[in-house]
Image (cartoon, grey):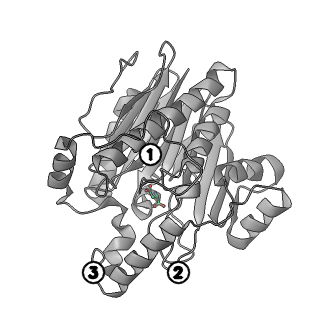
Amino acid sequence: MHILIHGGAGRMRSMGSHLEQQYRDGLRAACAHGAAVLRGGGTAGDAATAATVWMEDSGVFNAGLGSCLTYDGAVEMDAAVMEKGRRFGAVAAVNGVANPVLLARAVVEQTPHALLAGPGATAFARAQGFHFRDGFPSKARKATWRARRDELDAGRLEEGLAALGGVLGTPDEGAEIAALRGAGDEGSAGPDAKHDGEPMTDGDTVGAVALDSRGDCAGAVSTGGIWMKLPGRVGDCPLPGAGIWTAPGGEGAAVATGTGESLLRTLISKEVVDRMAQRGAQGGCATAIAFLEAEEGDNVGGVIGVTREGFGWALNTRGMGRAVWADGMDEPAVAVWPDEPWDRPVPGA
Ligand code: ASP
């Protein structure tokens, strides 16, 4: 059994050392949550969903409570789950519901459909008695939106439309990140970054893939999308093959993060699963990212994948927070930067 999660690729620009610590703590806690589900006999889909729910509730990531806002200041979230047998459920541009990933599961489990979008998805959530957040989006997210909207309207935010693909920041970020990495620890959030109040950081989209004790792989993803996206914009996340894919026989699963438009054009998650079948988990992820880069350029995204034999990840952005737990580990290991080793020994890594 193993579970690998990510906290989004690329957007490391605003991350100071204490925010980075919150992000790392959040990844470890979410992964531990998913691992506990696996150890308790849950399915890979249960575990990936549980880790994703944790991240949606944390406020640390761009999903659920921490979702970014559209140009109009609204929350429009996308989420999906996929298990073996092409069991795929998704929601797109859904508003207000606390846990879009659970709604995606309800779509596959309780309707004849695969994907519900917009007001229809939100109405389905209400009819099913899903929890809606009060005071959502938060004052903090609204304040960030106001500032970004002013910048965008003044033509300063990553030169307008570039910002709409701009979850990934600019090429000059490398130096900034190096400076951040060199900065001291100015106050960690402590071992448990989860909280019920305001979002704490500007973390990114989340996803999880897992292998359960039955030998089945599955995945889950959730996102607020990208800051200042046009209302109605849907990224890769809720589209099968793009943001998420699980092999029909359950022998592999992958999820993606980054600029959704590039990821959906390349069907990158299916690409990962297909390549993992030929080259193993790490080789499959690496060759899929090489393909993504050849098709869409540098600084586009990252992927994580699991097979029955192992797990892999790859990215062509400045960073991608990730955490892994495998049989034999006491607690998950975490890494953020491309060349960073896991911070704990990982069997098989
Ligand atoms: N892929 C997401 C989207 O484009 C964003 C992200 O992964 O950060 O909606």
For the point 72% across and 53% down, the residue is 103
Q: From this viewpoint, is residue 288 visible?
A: no
Q: Quadrant of the N terminus?
A: top right
Q: Is residue 330 above or below residue 75?
A: above
The mark total stands at: 3
Q: Is residue 41 above or below residue 158?
A: above
Is the CB atom of the residue marked by disc 3 within 8 angstroms of ligand 1's nearest atom? Answer: no
Which kind of residue does numbered mark 2 sit on?
Asp
Q: From this viewpoint, is residue 62 visible?
A: yes
Q: Earlier in the sequence, mark 3 or mark 2?
A: 2
Residue ranking furthest to the top: 328
Dot 1, crowdedness within 10 Å: few (<14), some or many (≥20)?
many
Q: Secondary structure at mark 3?
A: loop
Which kind of residue does numbered mark 1 sit on?
Gly
For the point 76% across and 57% down, the residue is 113
Counting from the top left corner in percent of width and height, residue 149 is at 41, 80
Q: Left or right of 34: which side holds 342?
A: left
Q: Left or right of 110: which side holds 263?
A: left
For the point 29% across and 85% down, the residue is 155
| Label pair 1/2, CB-CB below 8 angstroms | no
Q: Secondary structure at mark 2?
A: loop
- Specify the quadrant of the image occupied by residue 76: bottom right
Say the numbered circle drawn on residue 7.
Answer: 1
| Label pair 3/1, CB-CB below 8 angstroms | no
Give the residue pinned by disc 3. Answer: 156
Say the numbered circle drawn on residue 72.
Answer: 2
Q: Secondary structure at mark 1?
A: strand
Q: Nearer the viewer, residue 19 or 252?
A: 19
